[in-house]
Image (tube, helix red, strand yellow):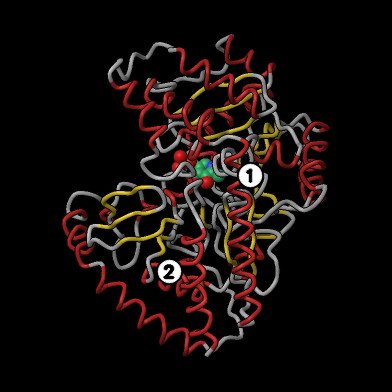
């Protein structure tokens, strides 16, 4: 996710100073990425905005990457960076991981696609069963496909049409969830009854109306909406910890209450663990927070840098798929190459020890960022879970999307991004993302990150 939201928070820091530093850093960025500019000029003649996915677009041009190894990436200008972007939270195994590389290379020589099940898919499904508390699994090719299948399952199981989602969450780009993703402030509607705001054009209004948003971290609001829509809601899809508007963890007791309420109203609970699933514990948020949904959707880090996803489900929902009542399809589902990568990633690289290391490295980085925030009295705080973390430029902790929209200082976030990029820290552009660590990150990498952050903090408060 990137560059698509604009928040309106404005901290007490000197705005002229922020503007002046942004202009200086923007010029430096443009000067050091001239080969990217040339790639962009060529690419835009063949791809809208010069990128394969709009989330890769950036102003004035994207940084085109040449290669990566461990925590390092090199762009087409030859600039070397320590990667904290990690492919939007995919590369927890580090770039060009030799174990995953060997598994994929071995599979290449045995044939890469049959559209018939191979043993790899059984092994990966068994591993997901072991990690997460759900008994049955299917494969997809992306997070979007996983959440689309999840919505079909909820509707198929209940015979109802409406879907609830959390205001300000992104679940991929299919019709049912491209609603109230980043609604602008003037379109929000009442907090207890948010409007269904389509995220862009191309979605039939009738479908948009079938998806309603509720605020995160507010079980009482959910309870009221469920009572109002009694008998009409098929499923609630949610990230157990929000990760597309920086990171917002669930408050104590919230997920437990959501589980009780969804049970009570016959609503299928879908945890979208595309971001959290393979990054915040071996069993994702489900294990970390101890609440089991009816459906779990996975993708991103699960397949170690290959385009795959998965969907976990209860035995009751699996029966709908097995009986053919709900269709779960895909030519490339369970592709042997992707399964080889997923198997090596999950069973050999992202082990329990690896999660302990990711957690410890993240804690160290967060502590060091918090120390800088305190020393320079920045209007910001550090937040993190597992491999994921961020500095949020808001004076107080966010609990939901409306806080994010009104509190986060977008200009400060953009300036921090420029400081990092110009000092060899590869970060996701935009206000809403977080860093993702890999098992390869070490103290030197953290030193570089904190060094750039401190320079930013010193300059912006000077
Ligand atoms: C929580 C969440 N769900 C679903 C998706 C969609 O995944 P994909 O981009 O693989 O389709 C994303 C992508 O960022 C995501 O963050």
Mark 2 Cβ and ligand 1 under 8 Å apart: no
- CA–CA distance between discs 1 and 2? 26 Å
Q: Who is closer to the viewer here, 374 or 253?
A: 374
Mark 1 Cβ and ligand 1 under 8 Å apart: no
Image label count:
2
Q: Who is closer to the viewer here, 189 or 87?
A: 87
> Which residue corresponds to the image point at 61% horizontal and 39% vertical from the top-left?
353
When the figure is inspected, residue 130 is found, relative to residue 247, above or below; the finding is: above
**Residue found at the far front of this picture:** 443
Q: Is residue 205 left or right of residue 118?
A: right
Neighbour tally class for label 2: few under 14, some 14-19, many 20 plus, Cα within 10 Å? many
Q: Who is closer to the viewer here, 236 or 458?
A: 458
Residue pointed to by mark 2:
420
Residue 326 got which mark? none
Residue 193 appears in the rendering: yes
Residue 462 horizontal/vertical position (percent): 52, 90
Q: Earlier in the sequence, mark 1 or mark 2?
A: 1
Disc 2 element: helix
> Which residue corresponds to the image point at 59% horizontal and 19% vertical from the top-left?
126
Residue pointed to by mark 1:
356
Residue 286 horizontal/vertical position (percent): 69, 36
Residue 204 appears in the rendering: no
> Which residue corresponds to the image point at 63% horizontal and 52% vertical from the top-left?
360
Q: Are marks 1 and 2 in contact (CB under 8 Å)?
A: no
Residue 258 horizontal/vertical position (percent): 78, 41
When the figure is inspected, residue 197 is found, relative to residue 335, above or below; the finding is: below
Q: Is residue 335 left or right of residue 221?
A: left
Residue 356 horizontal/vertical position (percent): 63, 44
Disc 1 element: helix
Mark 1 or 2: in front is: 1
Neighbour tally class for label 1: few under 14, some 14-19, many 20 plus, Cα within 10 Å? some
Q: Quadrant of residue 26?
A: bottom left
């Amino acid at each position: 996710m990137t560059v698509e939201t604009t928040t309106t928070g404005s901290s007490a820091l000197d705005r002229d100073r922020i503007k002046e530093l942004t202009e200086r850093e923007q010029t430096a960025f443009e000067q050091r990425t001239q080969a990217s500019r040339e790639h962009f000029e060529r690419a835009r003649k063949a791809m809208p905005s010069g990128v394969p996915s709009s989330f890769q677009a950036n102003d004035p041009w994207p940084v085109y990457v040449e290669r990566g190894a461990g925590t390092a990436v090199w762009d087409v200008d030859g600039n070397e960076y320590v990667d904290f972007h990690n492919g939007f939270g995919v590369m927890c195994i580090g770039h060009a991981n030799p174990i995953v590389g060997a598994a994929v290379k071995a599979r290449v020589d045995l044939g890469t696609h049959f559209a018939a099940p191979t043993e790899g898919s059984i092994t990966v499904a068994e591993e997901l069963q072991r990690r997460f508390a759900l008994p049955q699994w299917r494969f997809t090719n992306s997070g979007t496909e996983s959440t689309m299948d999840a919505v079909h399952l909820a509707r198929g199981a209940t015979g109802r049409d409406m879907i609830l989602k959390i205001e300000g969450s992104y679940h991929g780009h299919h019709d049912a969830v491209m609603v109230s993703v980043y609604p602008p402030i003037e379109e929000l509607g009442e907090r207890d009854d948010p409007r269904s705001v389509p995220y862009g054009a191309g979605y039939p209004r009738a479908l948009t109306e079938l998806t309603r948003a509720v605020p995160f971290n507010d079980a009482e609001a959910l309870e009221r909406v469920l009572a109002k829509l009694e008998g009409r809601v098929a499923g609630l899809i949610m990230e157990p910890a929000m990760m597309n508007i920086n990171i917002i963890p669930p408050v104590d007791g919230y997920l437990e209450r959501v589980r009780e309420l969804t049970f009570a109203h016959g609503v299928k609970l879908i945890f979208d663990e595309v971001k959290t699933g393979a990054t915040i514990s071996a069993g994702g948020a489900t294990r970390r927070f101890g609440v089991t949904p009816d459906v779990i959707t996975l993708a991103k880090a699960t397949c170690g840098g290959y385009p795959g996803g998965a969907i976990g489900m209860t035995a009751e929902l699996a029966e709908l798929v097995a009986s053919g009542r709900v269709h779960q399809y895909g030519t490339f589902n369970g592709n042997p190459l992707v399964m080889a990568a997923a198997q090596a990633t999950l069973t050999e690289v992202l082990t329990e020890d690896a999660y302990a290391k990711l957690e410890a490295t993240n804690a160290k980085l967060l502590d060091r960022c918090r120390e800088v925030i305190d020393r320079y009295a920045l209007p910001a705080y550090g937040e993190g879970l597992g491999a994921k973390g961020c500095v949020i430029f808001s004076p107080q902790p966010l609990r939901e999307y409306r806080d994010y929209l009104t509190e986060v200082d977008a200009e400060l976030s953009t300036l921090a991004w420029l400081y990092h990029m110009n000092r060899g820290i590869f970060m996701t552009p935009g206000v809403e993302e977080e860093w993702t660590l890999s098992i390869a990150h070490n103290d030197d990498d953290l030193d570089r990150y904190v060094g750039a952050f401190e320079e930013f903090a010193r300059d912006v408060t000077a």
